[in-house]
Amino acid sequence: MRPLDEKETTAVFEKIFKFTGNNLKNIVENPSHEGPDKEPGRYCFRLHKNKVYYVSDSLVKRATNVARTKLASIGTCVGRFTHGGNFHLTIECLNLLAANAKHKVWLKPTSEMSFLYANHVLKGGLGRITESIAPGDGVVVFSMSDLPLGFGVAAKSTQDCRKLDPNAIVVLHQADIGEYLRMENQHEQIIEE
Amino acid sequence: MKWELDISIELCFVDRQVTRVEGVNEDALEALYEKRRRKTLEQKENEKSVVQVDPVDALPVKSLDGERMKWFMLLYNAVSQTAEVTENEGDVDKSVVKLTKAERRAKLKKTKKEAKKMGKELAKTEEVQPTQQEAALAEVKEDLTAEEAFEAKKRKLAELGMALLADPEANIKSLKEMLQFAKDGDHSIVKLGLLSLLAVFKDIIPGYRIRLPTEKELEMKVSKEVKKMRFYESTLLSAYKCNNLLLIWACILHTIHGNMQQGYLQKLLALEKQPRFHHVVVRCICTLLDAVPHFNFRESLLVAVVRNIGSSDDVVRRICCSTIKSLFTSEGKHGGEATVEAVRLIADHVKVHDCQLHPDSVEVLMSLSFDDDLGKPEVQEGNNKMKNKKNKKRKNFEESNQPQGNDRKRSKQETIAKMKEEVAADYKAVSYTPDVEERKRMQSETLSAVFETYFRILRHTMQSSVARCVGPYSLHNYNEQCGWLLELCEFFSYNLFKAVSEANGNITSGGSGAHPLLAPCLSGLGKFSHLIDMDYIGDLMNYLKRLAARGSSSDSSAQKVQNLTVSERLRCCIVAFKVMRSNLDALNVDLQDFFVQLYNLVLEFRPGRDEGEVLAEALKIMLCDDRQHDMQKAAAFIKRLATFALCFGSAESMAALVTLKQLLQRNVKCRNLLENDAGGGSVSGSIAKYQPYGSDPSLSGALASVLWELNLLSKHYHPAISTLASGISSMNSAQNQVYISISPQQAFKNLLLEAESFKYNQQGGTQKSNKRKGRSTALASTLASVEPPPIDENEVSKKLRRHFILLRDIKENERLRGELDRATSALQLYKEYKKQRKPATLKNKKSKKARTTVGM
């Protein structure tokens, strides 16, 4: 477990910035109330076995007691670095993103399941969409009752969405909460390792 | 003969005074035209003899036989009055034109009788004082030659006009003569000439546009009647043109004079006479445009009208605006072409003047009406066209396949087709209704011009902010400090701007702080929002977003950027929502940025300074009408509205509470706020603490707070608000409540009305208050009732007394506690003093002892 170096930090922050915009500040400055200390600490990013974790300071201190090989996970896993050096967000960071999302899409109840099976969001399934989304922006996907379902990348701007036919793709799927069931095995394996 | 003349002069003089003292009744004015008619008939007989006797042409008094004399007087007075009246109010001369023949005759008789009476009186007065004015005679005579020429001209003018009206075709040549009058040196003659020409033209202009014959047509042989007709038309046209040119020339003259108002002796003259002249000219132009918008040279008329549409002169501006409005509303008269031209001209006008005009000049566009159904037939036509094309192709195909043997037949067919086309074209030209495509084209042109204007204004509002501190507009710097002076400042600076620009002669000048055109522009955008093209909406929303965000103090350049008022920014938000709503293509767009703006605007809102009406509208459109909200966002708005309902005026807080209630009804989870459970429990989300000054509603953490404001509001002095607040706070426990849903706007208006009656009640309602005591609470609960619920004075006074007693008690408490503190501290000090004193005395004793021992 170690802090991110400069290159890794920019990669992580750029990725998160796509989804949250200026709210990235809130993520970094979010006070943590964990641990025995009276004044709230901060959260920080830590790299451990190619995975990036969002951890409070006090937890980091206490985690130093555990040997590196024995440490399976700590705090919230935000994403992981691929072998090629790219950073990918994973579904575990959804709550973090959803609370600070800049661009949102609400799904109709009929198309929720489709999205939870890792399909892209089609225009027909769009219940609501925030204004001024540009193609390439990160978008958090919600159900109509404001439950975060996942996130993805916008394929079309809000303006273009008006003229699209119902079968066109609006948001490209990246991660959804269906993964917790579908990839249960993988997660278990990771922990067992 | 000379003596006679003098007497007549005297007579004239006296008689004018008499009539003035009596005050000529309005009928005399209308009588003018009757007089003219009579005169034309009789004058032809009398004129020769008069001219022979008197070298000063046409001195009707000469005959002194009663009849002529009277006419003269009346004519003079009438004419002088028309000149005055036309400047003040246009209604009277309209009535002149509209008189029916029967009325005319009746009036004629009446005036005759009056005139006879007057003549008799005159004779008497003359006998009474025959020599009184001999001394003044010489001077009067001098004046008279000019005056008489004036009278003569007037009379001549009247004659010509009557003749023209009686038989326009025969007397068409006299138009030119009348035009000569209008070029006279005397201002009032010019005025009269213009006015009478106006009346004549209004009557004789035909219901079609005149096309002058081409040379080829001139060569052709035509019947006598046609020739006559042509001559008539061409003369009319040339005269009309001259008239028009003259009018426009006069306009230009005026502006030039207006601009050169410095230092010359002429300045006085120009100031005194030009504005009057200007009024008459503008009135003429407007009436002509209103009456005959189809006729030739409409363009120049339009140019003149549009130029004056933003005039600083109230009268002129009102006339021009009403003319343009009537032009827009009565499109049948000119088939819509004039509308297109006018809108185009207004757009150019706004462009040239850099958006510094009176709001009226853009408000005019609101009266435009667009036909929504025009789009539909076009689709069908398109289909037809496709089919036709196909058919044609097929035909061509078939034709090409055919052997080319029968050339003669083909040529015959061609000629037939040509004939048909010609006939169709002719029919189109003659037929009254313009065809759909033409109308569609014109409509789209109009629309594009309108939106060009609106967008220009928006962009100008955005850009003007930078170059703001130039020249006299630093006045606006103070706007931030004294908000309530804002309107006033804007008004003054607008006028100042006008004056300065006129004095300098360059109306186009760089940035100014005021946005006089923004309000009408926004309302226009709201009205025509359903007609905006999809492609523009993105830009429009961007502009609106930036305008709404203007004035938020987070900008680093906030001091330089000119702040829009809160009402203006609220209006931007409203327009954005309207645009989005009317263009909903089954896509529900969440306008988050505007919600953020509204959230912050609620903070900046000051009840006295900003318009509560606008706030209520914004609340309704943005919060009540929108179906879905984020839970966080809704909670944030609920919390903030509740907080500010505490410090708003009663009407505004009513609107806020109604909105709050509807939000709570719709978002069941937000009712968590009503529970006494700080921290919010499971729904509070990631933010654990409520941030009352946060700028983003979704990050405010409002769900972690409790709506304690409602408890305070249920003790509000206004019964309606207190009942509503207590109703809301008990919303969670009482289940199957039937909610009366009224919009915030409605609530706002109701309360405003109530506030007025509240004041009224306070003045005279002390005796009645006992009666109402029992009913008041029951009545107050019916919120939306038409009658304002009576307010119980006793109740109010009791509440107030309780409040103030509490306050006084607190103060009393503080005072007492202070005294207690002082006493205890004094005691403590005394104790300490004693303690210190004791060891000291002990020491003293010891030292004394020591000394004594040493001494021993």
Image (cartoon, coloured by chain):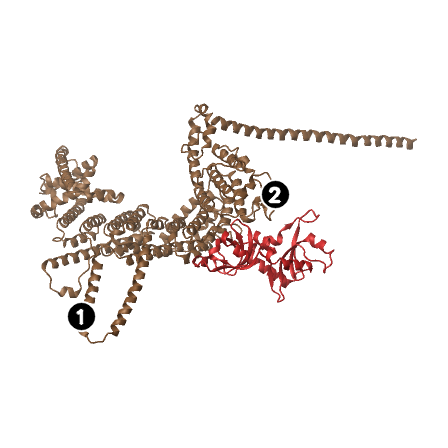
Chain colours: A red, B brown
Camera-side residue of B530 and B74:
B530
**What is the secondary structure assignment of the residue under circle 1?**
helix
**Mark 1 vs 2: CB contact within 8 A:** no
Give, as a three-letter code, the residue at label 1: Lys
Which quadrant of the view contains residue A159?
A: bottom left
Q: Report x, y in % for residue B698.
A: 54, 49
| Quadrant housing the N terminus of chain B | top left
Q: Which residue is mark 2?
A: B679
Q: Who is closer to the viewer here, B458 or B671?
A: B671
Left or right of B526, for residue B27: left
Query: Does the image show residue B126?
Result: yes
Query: Which residue is nearer to you in this view: B274 or B378?
Result: B378
- Within 10 angstroms of label 1, few (less than 14), some, or many (20 or more) residues? few
In the picture, which quadrant includes the C terminus of chain B?
top right
x, y percentage for residue B393? Answer: 29, 69
Q: Are marks 1 and 2 on the same chain?
A: yes
Q: Which residue is mark 1?
A: B412
On what subunit does the disc labeled 2 rest?
B
Quarter of image, res B104: top left
Left or right side of B449 for A60: right
